[in-house]
Amino acid sequence: MAKKYQKECKLKDGTVVLLRPLVAEDRKGLIAFFQSLPEELRLYLRHDVTDKEIIKSWTENIDYNRVFPILALDGDRIVGDVSLHRIPFGWKHHIGTIRVVVDPEYHDKGLGTLLINEIVELAAEFGLEKLWAELPLNFPAAISVFRKAGFSSKAVVEGLVKDLRGRNTDVVIMVCDIGTQYGF
């Protein structure tokens, strides 16, 4: 599946982006992408993506059955990254977790919605029943994008996490019922 997956898609402004899985050769481009993001966007990511060793581990240890990362490229430049995280065993084996980051220059062009929709479709192909996303409550634009892709808010947990500056942050948990999305 991973080697065959590749799509060209047109954004709202006419920009054509290529969607394809992350490969080891993307290391330098992925480092450049994450380092170009403003700090206020990186504050809510699960990893210090400015650490080249973290990106190196991601590109050296690709396991598409555990994490399916998709890049959005405008020419040779990475402008978006979305990943589907799966748990192979246990009581959550039917649930995937989604994480998405879009270059601010590509906000409001439909790229976030496109990437999330791609993951929802892939999750259905992989036989997952639900997708889970955790978002900072103070990111209403991101919450709106997830809603457009079929996610609904299930809970808000006040002060659950701390951002990289140590500030308490509220989190909204959103879930997409893939069966409902695709009529299963």
Image (cartoon, rainbow, N blue to C red):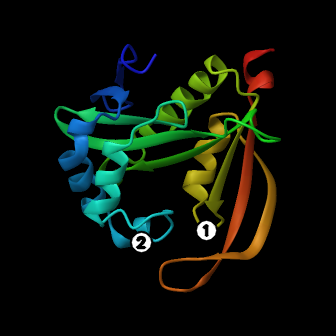
Measured as percent of width and height from the top left, residue 48 is found at 39, 67
Residue in front for this viewpoint, 50 or 147: 50
Instruction: Answer few, some or many: residues within 10 Å of disc 2's Cα (few below 14, many 20 plus, some between 14 and 19).
Output: few
Choose top left, top right, bottom left or bottom right for residue 163: bottom right
Residue in front for this viewpoint, 142 or 101: 101
Q: Nearer the viewer, mark 2 or mark 1?
A: 2
Q: Amino acid at mark 2?
A: Glu
Local SS, label 1: loop
Choose top left, top right, bottom left or bottom right for residue 35: bottom left
Who's the residue at 62% across and 48% down the image?
Answer: 144
Measured as percent of width and height from the top left, residue 134 is found at 65, 56
Q: Amino acid at mark 1?
A: Asn
- The residues tagged by marks 2 and 1 sit, at their Cα atoms, a distance apart of 12 Å
Local SS, label 2: helix
Residue in front for this viewpoint, 46 or 118: 46
Instruction: Answer few, some or many: residues within 10 Å of disc 1's Cα (few below 14, many 20 plus, some between 14 and 19).
Output: few
Does 6 sit left or right of 172 as displayed? left
Q: Which residue is mark 1?
A: 138
Up/down of 142 relative to 158, above or below: above
Measured as percent of width and height from the top left, residue 164 is found at 48, 79
Q: Earlier in the sequence, mark 2 or mark 1?
A: 2
For the C terminus, the image quarter is: top right
Q: Which residue is mark 2?
A: 40
- Find out whether the residues at labels 2 and 1 contact each other: C-beta distance under 8 Å: no
Who's the residue at 26% across and 61% down the image?
Answer: 52
